[in-house]
Amino acid sequence: MKPLVVAPAVLVLFVLSFALACNGAFSAAPAAELRYPVAVCDWMILKRQKLGAFPLAHDLGADGVEVDMGGLGNRATFDSKLGDPAVRAQFLAAARQHHLRFSSIAMSGFYAQSFAERDGVERMVQDAIDTAVALDVRVLFLPLGVPCDLVKRPDLRPRVVERLRAVGQRAAAAGVVIGIETSLDARAEAALLDEIGSPAVRSYFNFSNALQPGRDIHAEIRALGRDRIVQIHASNTDGHWLEQDPQVDLPAIKRTLDAIGWRGWLVIERSRDSARATDVRANFTANVSFLKQVFQPHSP
């Protein structure tokens, strides 16, 4: 049998292909390929709707940014610049330049406004949906904040269901999902979602909403289940960094999320050291680093 002769050009291609494959195996995976990419909230890093959020998020080590729609106050809709195509183009370019993605669009104005009682919510949510579609974002964050706390104000539930059904139809038509954050325990929130009955309205789970009332975070995650949780605010209230927080067993939380088969963005909102609450770089670098250490152990 004659020995196998490989043409030099073929050999070079083989070596290059092998080298590229090895390099890919040991390089950081793009956020799109990660099971648990990590993002930061632009308003919590003090860069709400500012291009500076992207270089800062990159320096913090994040994979993406949750971009807020801006304040509400007494306005007819959010104080957002992102309705302008030229501004959106700048945001898209900044994200590409710093190798980041948009994890989600936030409507944080509803922390202080009643989604159930405020006039004009349909326009507000539609503006957020239009922004998400224009930026190719698939998740929107909608907190049912203090004025719409369904534990303290159960009388608001029928109106909340009615309005979430309506905006859920708009979201479904646009191909996006609205993740709601409530003060309800997981079983009650699951029942609320089932009553709404829209695949475009799901749970935006927040560690602190389980931890602060003393609920079992693992039982809460399991009660909601993989298909109801669309995204996670992976932080507690301020006081300690995640790694130092006695309430947070991050490796155990990962095991629970792994067990239910969940995957998606982990977005850092708080967990700032109370002794240095305004030190954005220290707080968010520490929390991004620890989340990645636990949830992305094979990424450099």
Image (spheres, rainbow, N blue to C red):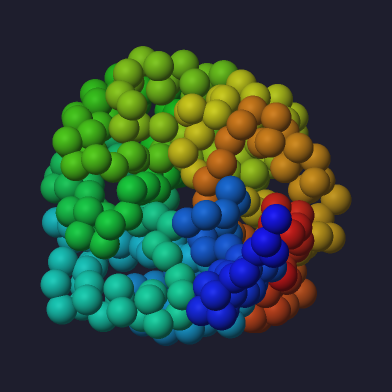
Locate residue 152 relative to residue 73 in the image: left or right.
Answer: right
Q: Position of residue 221 (x, y in %)?
A: 64, 30
Task: Please give the name of the residue rendered at 36% of the width and 15% of the height, measured from the top-left corner.
Answer: 195
Task: Please give the name of the residue rendered at 18% of the width and 53% of the height, measured from the top-left corner.
Answer: 130
Q: Is residue 39 above or below residue 113?
A: below
Count of numbered badges drawn on the protein: 0
Q: Position of residue 107 (x, y in %)?
A: 34, 53
Please tell me which residue lies in front, 133 or 126: 133
Q: Position of residue 43 (x, y in %)?
A: 45, 68
Q: Residue furthest front?
A: 1
Question: What is the quadrant of residue 202 in the picture?
Answer: top left
Q: Position of residue 95 (x, y in %)?
A: 38, 75
Task: Please give the name of the residue rendered at 32% of the width and 20% of the height, measured from the top-left corner.
Answer: 196
Please tell me which residue lies in front, 180 or 170: 170
Locate residue 115 relative to residue 111 in the image: left or right.
Answer: left
Task: Please give the name of the residue rendered at 45% of the width and 80% of the height, measured from the top-left corner.
Answer: 98
Q: Is residue 155 above or below residue 251?
A: above
Q: Is residue 296 above or below residue 200?
A: below
Residue 215 appears in view = no
Q: Quadrant of the N terminus?
A: bottom right
Q: Is residue 50 above or below residue 68?
A: below
Q: Quadrant of the C terminus?
A: bottom right
Please tell me which residue lies in front, 296 or 142: 296
Residue 212 appears in view = yes
